[in-house]
């Protein structure tokens, strides 16, 4: 267990310190080697929990802080929930390390890149093995740091720097909530140890507490504060703006951090604290609502973007919304299941997109792709598997790709919950599933079908040294995309297997808790297992079970119609629906709104405080004012010492009169 | 009588300071470095021999002087930690001045060594007047360091510094005279247990506050700090930010809180109010600075506001957190000023826009700078996180509003520090002269590496630093317990709900799950 967590840290430090003083192969081998060992060590743990041979365990490491009643230690906790995260993190991370051998081949700063990747993995592992909220926060901030460094990896690009800072600062807004949540939890429970909090939570479900001068429900306010932290990390509506910009980082980073692992930390947190959230109905309502809203919001934006990575980024945002509303309605198992399957197929889609970008000389705009399936067939088939998984293709009771099981379970759970909010989430989820299918197939059709449109791309023009006018009919411009090296194809192959089988293999364990009916045995108390809800989930009407498949087919058909059959449709639709299209295309104007609401006023206020406050008021009337008074006073005092006897006499006389007056009256 | 280690720690730099006055430049440098290293070794001995959980005041020495005024030294855990901070930073300051100070080197080194004497004296003094002398005398070498070896506008800055800090001190002296008169002793440990009448406490508290608030510095008496920092030589900034700013906090924890508990509780609202304003105000000002030193100076004001708020939370977490912020900030802001000094020595400008892309030609420097930037932001695993986390946790028990406002500081802190880092270390190498700067040399490495190690140590295993202070903090909390304000977040447990929030009932046949 210690080895799984600390190998990546050691590898990261060694790689970072050696940096360029050894050939980059050294740093690459040591980090990748460490990650593969960690990954191989974590699978037996996970399978041990699946077949029930392992139980939860805590490995203490070191005392951290003892301050009065507030005490917390460094410790590694392993239970089912952690084991799930362990395999997800280590597997995807190891594959991404390997993939980066090929993808980052020509970069001069490879040791730094691999050191950051391993550092990220360490921080993420600390997060998921946390026994107390503060260690979770340590991992939380650690992954934030690694994310900041990796988004800004190409630090010469101003856009990458801006995106890195944005990611960090927006996450800090969430952290504010998380920190306040920890403080409040400590105040209420007198501890930050997660098991102790979860045990004591039900007794507090009727409690009230003061917050900002109001009396509020204790558990609701605590859970909402913690959820704000989760919203930041998991890019939920309102705090989502950093995720699309984070695509400035290298593509392997997007696959590892901004799809499979870090962004799911918020979902993990809600599931980890699920017994606590179950004492907070208002907070759970908020989780459901935000999840459902994010799910539909991101899907609408995803349908209009041209950058291949941004489409997948909005898709991630949308899928995270699914996980949150699943948690909100009490289906934590389904939320974790979707997290698990999503990690495989979304990492696959990103790495596939990376392979496409690699083939297309760093062109990311899908308008300049087309007909790539013949040129890069392996990538095409991998992406195909990913698309089938994310759109949830499958036949009920027979076989489905990974997303088929997890997304269906979430929609059924929302419906089975039976409340208005649950129904809202169900319909939003179904609509978003339609859009998911549409934008996923749109991506596939634009990239792999149709005619080659590469010559319009500046990247390709630079490569072949030709302009569109010069090449005439040949829209490839003589450029031939090439399949990626083997180090990139192996991870694609492994993840393809995951995208195909992960759902089918593990559906019983995640949803029911075991192969023998609804028991929750797999989870073994590591999440709140709502047995009645799972029973109701299985008993929903057939039309509910078929909804996801039905909307998937409509989405596919619409995408086929618009991007294969008649390619003039998208342009006409955008024109007809001008305002709506622009609203979606500009991401609902969140960035502009925040810019004028927060960034501009902050700088303006800073300048006012400095120029008018410090210099104009405090200094002017403070030290400079005193100096001025002293100076003038000195000049005045000089006049008194005139040396003329009659002035002294006059002053004495006046003083005498004043004194007598004072004494007499 | 046990070995007078504290007196020795005062004597070593004092003798070296006198010697430096008569030595030429290279000899003065060596002497100063040697003396400060001896003092560091003595400090380590002090720490190792400090009996955790033993007597409250250890290593005590006393010799009566005149009129009941005593030469009395002694330390508790709080003073021990601050002395350690001083003796740790001192050799680094000497190294930082090695090449950059070329005129009047002997006098410069003497001023620094004298500074060290006075700082150790302040933290070790057990007599009220002895404390006052050390506390005020500390102004003089700093005034000279800024005024003689400072930048272009050094005269204005040194006068501003002197006037501000002196003004507060006069009031404090009057209050001290009154206290000694009333209590009949100038012994600090006795005074810490003495109960002054509540109405007198009010005025005494205000008189001390005038002095400590300026030293801290709290908004709105902070404007001397940016000017002093900008004009001071690098090592002067390090000592100013690292140790002198801690005198205010030390004053609160040693005098205001234990000696005037009633007034402290009554006036806590004032401290909270000023702290809240300071966090937001100075963070926003830091955001728009073009001068690196000014930016870090303003960020110091914001950090110190968390210290004051934490101290007046009147609970263990708040007090310990405030102490940890002081120690952590002492290291981190000192290190940040050193980072500025390193590139200032090369390019002779503090203007942020003149740099850029330094991580290309100075990767080692960029790594250190990143570590200290992250520590300043309060990333877990670094010293400042422990302090800020504990302090804010303590404040939360008193007021959620103050916590909310102070915690916004962590957002703004991230914004201005990352914005600074981006403009200095990232981006294109747009200035040819900045791009040609060499990476850290061995001397600079020797300055930054020990601080980096200490920052991480304090972040990962703060127990080494918390343990010596624990008993003294608890004693202080006990003293304050009777007057501690009732917190607004009082919990009412109520009746627990019967069901979980997502309670549903399944009415079908549970066996046929699929």
Image: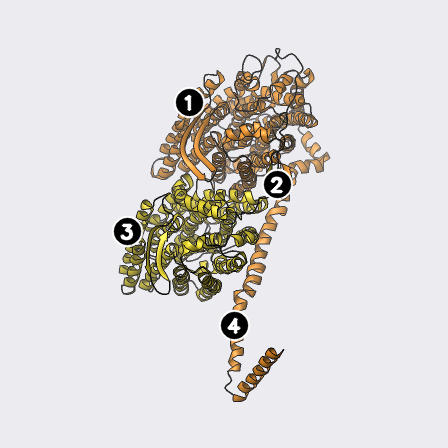
Chain colours: A orange, B yellow
- Tell me the residue that label 3 is attached to: B2
Q: Chain of mark 3?
A: B
Mark 1 vs 4, N-terminal side: 1
Identity of the residue drawn at 41% across and 56% down = B188
- Tell me the residue that label 1 is attached to: A40
Pick whichever, A259 or A155, lies toward us. Answer: A259
Name the mark nearer the viewer: 3 or 1. Answer: 3
Mark 4 vs 2, N-terminal side: 2
Find residue B457 and report its image quarter: top left
Please indicate whether residue B146 sits to the left or right of residue A187 in the image: left
- Tell me the residue that label 2 is attached to: A210
Please tell me if label 4 and label 3 are on a single chain: no
Q: How far apart are labels 3 and 2 at the CA level?
A: 53 Å
Q: How far apart are labels 4 and 2 at the CA level?
A: 51 Å
Q: How far apart are labels 2 and 1 at the CA level?
A: 49 Å
Q: How far apart are labels 3 and 1 at the CA level?
A: 60 Å
Residue B325 screen position, x and y as percent: 46, 47
Please tell me if label 3 and label 1 are on a single chain: no
**Mark 1 surroundings: few (<14), some (14-19) or many (≥20) residues within 10 A:** some
**Mark 2 surroundings: few (<14), some (14-19) or many (≥20) residues within 10 A:** some
Q: Chain of mark 1?
A: A
Is residue B274 something that shows in the picture? no
Name the mark nearer the viewer: 1 or 4. Answer: 4
Mark 3 lies on a secondary structure that is loop
Name the mark nearer the viewer: 4 or 2. Answer: 2
Mark 2 vs 1, N-terminal side: 1
Q: Which mark is residue A630?
A: 4
């Amino acid at each position: 267990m210690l080895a799984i967590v600390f190998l990546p840290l050691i590898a990261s430090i060694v790689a970072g310190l050696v940096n360029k003083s050894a050939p980059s192969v050294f740093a690459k081998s040591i980090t990748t080697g460490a990650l593969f060992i960690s990954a191989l060590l974590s699978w037996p743990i996970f399978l041990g929990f699946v077949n029930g041979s392992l139980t939860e365990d805590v490995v203490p490491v070191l005392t951290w802080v003892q301050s009065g009643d507030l005490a917390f230690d460094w410790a590694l906790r392993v239970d089912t929930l952690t084991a799930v995260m362990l395999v997800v993190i280590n597997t995807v991370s190891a594959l991404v390390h390997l993939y980066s051998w090929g993808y980052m081949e020509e970069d001069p700063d490879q040791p730094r890149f691999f050191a950051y990747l391993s550092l990220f993995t360490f921080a993420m592992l600390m997060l998921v093995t946390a026994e107390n909220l503060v260690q979770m926060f340590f991992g939380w901030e650690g992954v934030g740091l690694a994310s900041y460094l990796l988004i800004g990896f190409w630090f010469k690009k101003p856009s990458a720097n801006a995106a890195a800072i944005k990611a960090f600062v927006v996450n800090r807004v969430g952290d504010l909530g998380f920190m306040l949540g920890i403080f409040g939890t400590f105040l209420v429970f007198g501890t930050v140890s997660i098991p102790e909090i979860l045990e004591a939570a039900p007794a507090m479900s009727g409690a009230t507490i003061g917050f900002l001068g109001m009396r509020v429900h204790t558990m609701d306010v605590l859970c909402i504060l913690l959820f704000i932290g989760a919203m930041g990390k998991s890019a939920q509506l309102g705090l989502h703006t950093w995720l699309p910009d984070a695509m400035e980082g290298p593509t392997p980073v997007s696959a590892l951090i901004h799809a499979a692992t870090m962004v799911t930390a918020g979902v993990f947190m809600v599931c980890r604290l699920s017994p606590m959230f179950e004492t907070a109905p208002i907070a759970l309502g908020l989780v459901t609502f935000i999840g459902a809203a994010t799910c539909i919001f991101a899907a609408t934006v995803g349908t209009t973007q041209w950058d291949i990575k941004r489409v997948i980024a909005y898709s991630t945002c949308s899928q995270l919304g699914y996980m949150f509303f699943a948690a909100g309605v009490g289906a934590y198992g389904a939320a974790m299941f979707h997290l698990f399957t999503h990690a495989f197929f979304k990492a696959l889609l990103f790495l596939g997109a990376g392979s496409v970008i690699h083939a297309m000389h760093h062109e990311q705009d899908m308008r300049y792709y087309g007909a790539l399936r013949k040129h890069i067939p392996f990538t095409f088939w991998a992406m195909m598997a990913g698309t089938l998984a994310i759109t949830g293709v499958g036949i009920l009771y027979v076989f489905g790709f990974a997303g088929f099981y997890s997304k269906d379970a979430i929609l059924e759970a929302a419906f089975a919950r039976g409340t208005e909010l649950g129904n809202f989430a169900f319909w939003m989820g179904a609509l978003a599933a339609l859009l998911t299918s549409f934008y996923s197939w749109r991506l596939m059709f634009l990239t792999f079908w149709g005619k080659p449109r590469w010559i319009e791309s500046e990247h390709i023009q630079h490569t072949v040294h030709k302009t569109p006018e010069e090449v005439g009919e040949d829209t490839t411009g003589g450029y031939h995309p090439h399949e990626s090296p083997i180090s990139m194809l192996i991870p694609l192959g492994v993840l393809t297997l995951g995208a195909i089988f992960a759902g089918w293999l593990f559906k019983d364990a995640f949803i029911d808790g075991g192969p023998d009916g609804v028991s929750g045995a797999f989870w073994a108390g590591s999440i709140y297992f709502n047995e009645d809800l799972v029973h109701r989930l299985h008993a929903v009407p057939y039309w509910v079970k078929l909804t996801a498949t039905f909307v998937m087919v409509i989405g596919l058909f619409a995408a086929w119609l618009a991007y294969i059959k008649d390619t003039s449709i998208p342009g006409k639709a955008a024109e007809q629906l001008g305002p709506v299209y622009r609203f979606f295309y500009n991401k609902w104007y969140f960035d502009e709104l925040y810019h004028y609401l927060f960034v501009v006023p902050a700088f303006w206020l800073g300048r006012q405080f400095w120029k008018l406050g410090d210099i104009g008021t405090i200094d002017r009337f403070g030290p400079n004012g005193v100096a001025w008074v002293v100076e003038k006073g000195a000049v005045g005092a000089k006049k008194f010492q005139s040396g003329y006897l009659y002035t002294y006499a006059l002053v004495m006389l006046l003083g005498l009169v004043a004194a007598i007056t004072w004494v007499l009256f | 009588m046990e070995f007078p280690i504290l007196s020795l720690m005062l004597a070593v730099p004092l003798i070296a300071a006198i010697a430096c006055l008569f030595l030429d430049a290279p000899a003065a440098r060596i002497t100063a470095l040697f003396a400060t290293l001896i003092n560091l070794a003595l400090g380590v001995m002090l720490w190792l021999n400090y009996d955790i959980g033993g007597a409250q005041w250890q290593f005590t020495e006393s010799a009566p002087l005149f009129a009941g005024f005593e030469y009395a030294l002694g330390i508790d855990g709080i003073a021990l930690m601050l002395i350690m901070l001083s003796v740790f930073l001192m050799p680094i300051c000497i190294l930082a001045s090695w090449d950059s100070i070329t005129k009047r080197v002997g006098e410069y080194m003497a001023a620094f060594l004298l500074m060290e004497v006075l700082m150790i004296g302040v933290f070790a003094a057990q007599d009220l007047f002895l404390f006052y002398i050390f506390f005020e005398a500390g102004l003089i070498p700093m005034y000279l360091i800024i005024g003689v070896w400072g930048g272009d506008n050094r005269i204005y800055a040194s006068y501003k510094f002197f006037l501000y800090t002196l003004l507060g001190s006069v009031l404090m002296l009057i209050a001290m005279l009154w206290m000694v008169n009333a209590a009949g002793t100038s012994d600090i440990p006795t005074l810490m247990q003495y109960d002054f009448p509540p109405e007198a406490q009010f005025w005494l508290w205000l008189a001390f506050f005038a002095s400590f608030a300026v030293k801290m510095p709290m908004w709105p008496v902070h404007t001397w700090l940016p000017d002093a920092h900008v004009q001071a030589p690098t090592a002067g900034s390090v000592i100013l930010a690292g140790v002198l700013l801690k005198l205010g906090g030390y004053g609160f924890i040693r005098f205001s809180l234990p000696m005037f508990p009633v007034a402290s509780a009554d006036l806590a609202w004032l401290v909270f109010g000023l702290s809240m304003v300071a966090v937001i105000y100075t963070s926003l000002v830091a955001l728009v600075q073009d001068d690196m030193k000014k930016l870090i100076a303003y960020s110091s004001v914001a950090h110190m506001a968390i210290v004051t708020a934490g101290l007046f939370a009147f609970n263990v977490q708040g007090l310990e957190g405030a102490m940890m912020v002081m120690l952590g900030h002492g290291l981190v802001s000192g290190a940040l000023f050193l980072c500025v000094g390193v590139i200032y020595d090369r390019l002779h400008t503090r203007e942020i826009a003149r740099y850029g892309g330094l991580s290309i030609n100075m990767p080692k420097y960029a790594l250190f700078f990143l570590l200290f930037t992250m520590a300043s932001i309060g990333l877990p695993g670094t010293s400042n996180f422990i302090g800020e986390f504990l302090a804010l946790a303590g404040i939360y028990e008193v007021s959620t509003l103050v916590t909310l406002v102070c915690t916004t500081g962590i957002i703004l802190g991230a914004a201005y520090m990352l914005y600074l880092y981006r403009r200095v270390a990232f981006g294109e190498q747009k200035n040819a002269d900045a791009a040609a700067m060499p990476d850290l040399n061995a001397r600079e490495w020797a300055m930054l590496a020990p601080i980096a190690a200490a920052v991480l140590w304090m972040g990962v295993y703060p127990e080494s630093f918390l343990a010596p202070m624990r008993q003294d903090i608890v004693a202080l909390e006990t003293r304050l317990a009777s007057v501690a304000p009732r917190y607004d977040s009082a919990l009412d447990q109520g009746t627990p709900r019967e069901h979980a929030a997502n309670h549903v009932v399944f009415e079908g046949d549970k066996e046929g799950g699929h």
